Every structure is written in structure tokens, then in C-alpha cells.
Image (cartoon, rainbow, N blue to C red):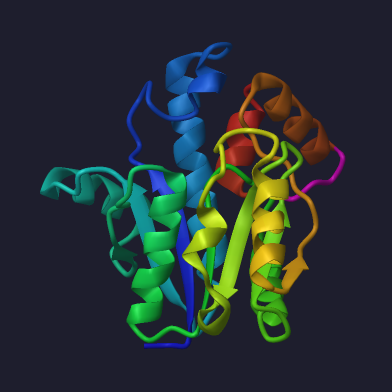
Amino acid sequence: MTETALIVFLKFPEKGKVKTRLSRDLNKDFVFELYKAFVSDLVEKLRSVRNTFFFVWPLMEKTDEEKKVLENLIGREVYFYCQQGDHLGDRMANAFNTVFDQGCEQAVLIGTDIPEINADLIFNAFDMLEKNAAVIGPATDGGYYLIGFRKSGFSKSVFDGIEWSTQQVLSRTIAGMNQQGITCGFLPKLDDIDTLEDLKALALRCKNGGSIGWHTRKLLEQL
């Protein structure tokens, strides 16, 4: 077991049940392929993060059939755990507790909705955990795309009392850290991709030299 863990939260890839806000304006088949492209590109980028235990935490039942679908999308060299908890905060806290219980001293958790994330950001997050008890990557929608902790500085209470999927997620999380005396480092702000406007803005940034994975870039060319 390495001392660092990278946790990826994702939804099981099922048409009509991923990126639902995008599906209001775009064809569901396109949205489904886009979500899979986000996941595939993310996994390819993160393979360069060496000496790190790589976990994938899907929101699913973890049947054999579902696991085969994920293995075909992600590969078999990662470790799968199902998300457990009544709300997102519970599920994230349980994931951190699991990897810390298995011997990891630092852990970083990310989602799959930030196609501009890259390995350098992950390296920077772990670097910040050398000097801080926590690290956060703020998202422009008021949430965050990355959160990480040192084992010695982790507190489940950071995830308590937060109304998820609102513009107050980041500020409430930081307030909780401050109350617990948890020092936190901050990464650059990135854009979450939830709406058609978000996707159009991403496509424009790519035209102007922005960096994303080739699976996602190929689909954006169809817009």
C-alpha cells in the first residue's frame, strides 16, 4: 500500500441518468457518449500519477454486469468500491475513512465533471498536503472539483450540514474547516460542466488552446 490515495467518484454510466441537465438541451445519446469521454480522458490523465493507490468509487449496486461495464470503460487495474451513505457528504467521508483505514496517509478525491483537470493539478494537491491538513480545488459554480486530506487532519464533520448542489458548498466547507482548525491549500478555480452553456464555453476555450482529452475533444467537434 502506498501512502497516497486518489479517489474518483462517478455515476454508473447509464443513458438518461448521467449529466441530466445537459440532456435537457442535447440528444441523450450524445450526452451519454460525452460522459463516457469525460471518464475515459480522466483515467488516461491520472495514470501518470505514479506511486498512488487508484480507487474508483461508483454510485451503483456493484453487480457483476455493472462491474464488467466499468472495467471495459476504465480498466481492471483500479480498485472499485461502491459509494455508501445517505447523501454525498456521507459517501465522501466514508471513502476517506476507508482509504485511511487501509494505511494511506494522504487522500485526494475528485469527480468526473471537470474535463480540464490534469495530472499536474493532482501532483500539486498532494504537494499542498505536505504543508496543510486539507486541499480544495474550487469550481466556478460555488462547489469544488477536488478535496483532499491528510489522515491526521481529517474530520468527517467537514461534510456535515451542507446543502449539496448549491452555490454555498465551497463556502460552507471552508467554514467547517475553519471551525475545526483545519489548514487548507487552494488550487486554481476550474469550470464544472453541467449545462449547455458550460459545454459551449469549454468548446470555445479548446479552440483558443485549452487542453482536454482527445475523447472529449472529438465529441466537442460535433457541436
Relative to 108, residue 168 above or below: above
Q: Residue at x 43, y 60 (%)?
A: 93
Asked if the magenta segment contains residue 54, the reply would be no
Dominant secondary structure (helix, strand or loop) of the stretch shown in magenta: loop
Check the picture and name the quadrant holding the N terminus: bottom left
Quarter location, residue 98: bottom left
Direction right: furthest residue: 208
Relative image position of residue 133 (x, y in whole percent)? 65, 78
Direction left: furthest residue: 64
Q: Residue at x 81, y 31 (%)?
A: 204
Whether residue 212 is visible to the viewer of this picture, yes or no, is: no
Relative image position of residue 164 (x, y in whole percent)? 55, 38
Judge left or right: residue 166 versus residue 66: right
Judge left or right: residue 18 versus residue 109: left
Front-most of residues 140 and 149: 149
Q: Residue at x 56, y 21 (%)?
A: 22
Range shown magenta = 208-212
Relative image position of residue 153 (x, y in whole percent)? 58, 78
Direction front: furthest residue: 179
Q: Residue at x 39, y 66 (%)?
A: 55
Front-most of residues 16 and 187: 187
Relative to 222, residue 76 above or below: below
Judge left or right: residue 62 versus residue 1: left
